[in-house]
Amino acid sequence: MSKRSGSGTSQERSPKKKRGLISADQSRLDLYFSNPTNGHPGREGTDRKKEPQLRLAKPGEGPHNTEIIDVDLDEDASPTVASGSPAPACRPSSPRRTLKVNVPEIVVSDIEYSSLTTDSLTFRSETPQLQAGHAVPYSFLAHALSELSSTRSRISILNILTNAIRVIIECHSPSLLPAIYLLSNTLSPPYSSVELGLGPSVISKAIQHVSGLSSAALKRLYTSTGDVGDVAFQAKSKVRTLVPHPSLTAPVVYSTLLQISKCAGQGAAAKKQGLVERLLVSAKGEEVRYLVRTLSQNLRVGAVRTSIFIALARAMVLVKPSSALYSSEHCIDPTRLKRANIDKKNKKASTAKDTVNEAFKAAEGLIRRVYAQHPSYDDIINALLESGLEGLSAKVPLTVGIPLHPTLGSPARSLSEVYKLLNGREFTAEYKYDGQRAQIHASKLVDDTVNVHIFSRHLEDMTTKASLEYPDIIALVEVFFSTRPELRSFIMDSEVVAINPQNGSLKTFQELSYRARKDVLIKDVEVQVGVFAFDLMFLDGEILLSRPLRERRALLHLNFAPRTPQEQSVARFDHVASCESNSGKENVEEFWEKAIESRCEGLMIKVLDNEGQPDVSVPTRKKPLPATYEPDKRTTAWLKLKKDYVDGLGDSLDLIPIGAWHGNGRKAAWWSPILLGVWDTESGRVVAVCKCMSGFSDQFYKEFTERYRLHEQPSVCSDRPAWACDMGGYRPDVYFKPQEVWEIRGADITISPTSVAALGLANPSRGLSLRFPRFIKVREDKSVMQASTPQFLADLWKKQDDRGFEDVDDGLIDVDPSDDVAESEEESDDCNSKGLR
């Protein structure tokens, strides 16, 4: 299921067919740093006067003799004068104007921190550069980010993060929450609508204003560095100030980012620029580089969410406990930790080391489980600092109004495979509707008012004032409470589907996408919807996650009866259509056919009951199939059987467009083929997997090319690698910012000499690729970090029938973009009559 795909409507302008016609000096900052008047709105036709630069006195000049110089006069063109303005006084012939003043000598140097790459078991957390009880300097975070960006080793990344978090906790624990947000390059929980909202022009103007460099000088820097953070670092390195500004701290940087996100209305851009300039003026050394990368939301380090969870858990185990944590069974006795260090150096098996590793594993699992049910760094960090790991589950429980990550299903290729995988377990087969997944939270307040939140699959709140999408579902929930006074609260998992209001028949997702998405009023609702509930995770104060599906489903049916309101302003409600396995294989097969005829995507197969206690004396490689609700997990206890899976590849993939080549023949005006990638959760970057040129309509090609114009959309399209993606052996003509997710199907998965996706998981020296990939639809319900992973790709490869290691792609899918024959062969496959899906 997915949201609607975006579409552009502006007049078509296509990229050039031949790359040679495009200037090699152009970059994605052609517009980013192109306007010479960006520094001062309203000063058209004039360059800003250069800010003075402070040079420290040379030896022998005396400690108080300081020279003020102009910035880079030799780099910039002479300013022009607007018509009607008085002519400026002539500059001296010397390129440097000097003025002697008496000010204390200012020592400009970066604080040097010890390396954080040391093994976390032997790392000494004492950091003399930090003052205990004082906010952690942002320079320390910049140091950690610098070390993270210099390695791709997962072990090193975990050591750096663990050691950094440990230092922060011991030095100034209130700095931990801002630091976690800055390390993860986020501002708020995923369900909160806090967005930085900084455009490239605001950042470029701020850099110009602070550095005194012209747009041409900044463009030259970008041409040589290729990174906006590096541009800011070099530009700021030439600037000194008369009066030292207060050093930046992690809490100050984070709070300033929140201030930027709240700027709205008239003059918001100027306010944002002022806040950015304030940060840049105070930033020193590496702080500048990572501050600007943070502002650009392109941190370029491998600190993904999973790595941060692991590091946070290990730091909480290793940190010297405060009085509040001494009783925690998760913390390690310092003497035992010392013993583990000694044994590690001697490379001996150690009971102490095993104890530490077990504590690590338990703490990591705890934090992951808690976050899956309650994805809020704010609540988790505060609970950890207050009560340690011991009290985390109690202080941060599943809560109405805060979404939990949904359970996800694994693919199956046929009903016979379903019966084989479940091996006699009783299951229910449910319609897999072609709609939008919706997690409904509702509670009755003290004054009997009803509080309702509806969350999408990726936890977006669809009931805020700015994005109210389903007022008719809110009206339905209010009916639940008005007809059942004893009902107090619930969390329900469901699918929202467009329906025919006359007979209740199902419509496609395409028709659901016609609904307005923001500030929808009930009177304006034109597309009627039905809510089809399939799970209940919370009811009247009781968490139901640990109960088997059979019990959860019984409570759902008992407490929420189907409703067909007479008013079109209220959504319909029903339970998902289902068929039990004990009714026989023939009935299940008939139910499958009925699902396809009813415009459903297929079936969801779900285990109803938990298994008994396994016989531990009998070794087995089979994973347990729990009937419990498993947040943030893709489980084989839920199997999805889609009509597209029955033939060919057993599952579609959710891939990310990251590049393209110039089209040929009929497609010369468009980007084609398009390079797609998977999301590597360990490295925190996209890895290229295949090219795709099938399944696109002409309209889609036009709108996609419109969204990614090489020189007119520099923030999303570049002729050089501007984003942290692993391209393997692919060399596209243009590179795209990873920001979309597409559903893609293919014939099968092959070992490829070009792709490095899943490198080492199927073949020690080659990656995996998708043969004959075909575009299905845009997945607007998924973020980039929810795209398919290399491990998922490898799992699909292993499931293919008669798979051998000799089945190598040999580059067959890597179509030469200059080959018109390849393009024309694909034309017959294009669904040109199909619009956007």
Image (tube, rainbow, N blue to C red):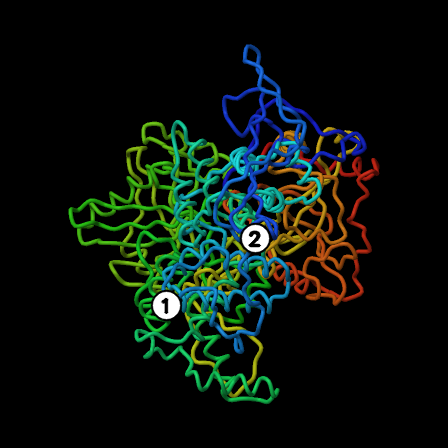
Q: Residue at x 71, y 52 (%)?
A: 770
Find residue 413 and report its image quarter: bottom right
State which quarter of the image contains the C terminus: top right
Name the amino acid, label 1: Ser
Q: Secondary structure at mark 1?
A: loop
336, above or below 826, in the image: below
Name the amino acid, label 2: Glu
- Given residues 242 and 336, the one toward you in this image is 242
Q: Residue at x 55, y 13 (%)?
A: 86
Tag of residue 607: none
Q: Which residue is mark 1?
A: 546
Which residue is most to the left? Answer: 447
809 on left or right of 180 = right
Viewer-nearest of discs 2 and 1: 2
User: In the rendering, at what x and y percent does residue 319 appear?
Assistant: 42, 74
585, above or below 269, in the image: below
24 on left or right of 207 = right
Q: Secondary structure at mark 2?
A: helix
- Whether residue 414 can be seen here: no
Q: Residue at x 48, y 45 (%)?
A: 103
* Sequence-first tag of 2 and 1: 2
Q: Which residue is mark 2?
A: 286
- Given residues 58 and 762, the one toward you in this image is 58
Find residue 521 and report its image quarter: top left
User: In the rendering, at what x and y percent does residue 356 appear?
Assistant: 48, 81
The answer to whether mark 2 and mark 1 are in CB contact below 8 A is no
User: In the rendering, at what x and y percent does residue 433 appear?
Assistant: 47, 47
What is the crowding at mark 1: few (fewer than 14 residues within 10 Å), some, or many (at least 20)? Answer: few
Q: CA distance from mark 2 to mark 1?
A: 47 Å
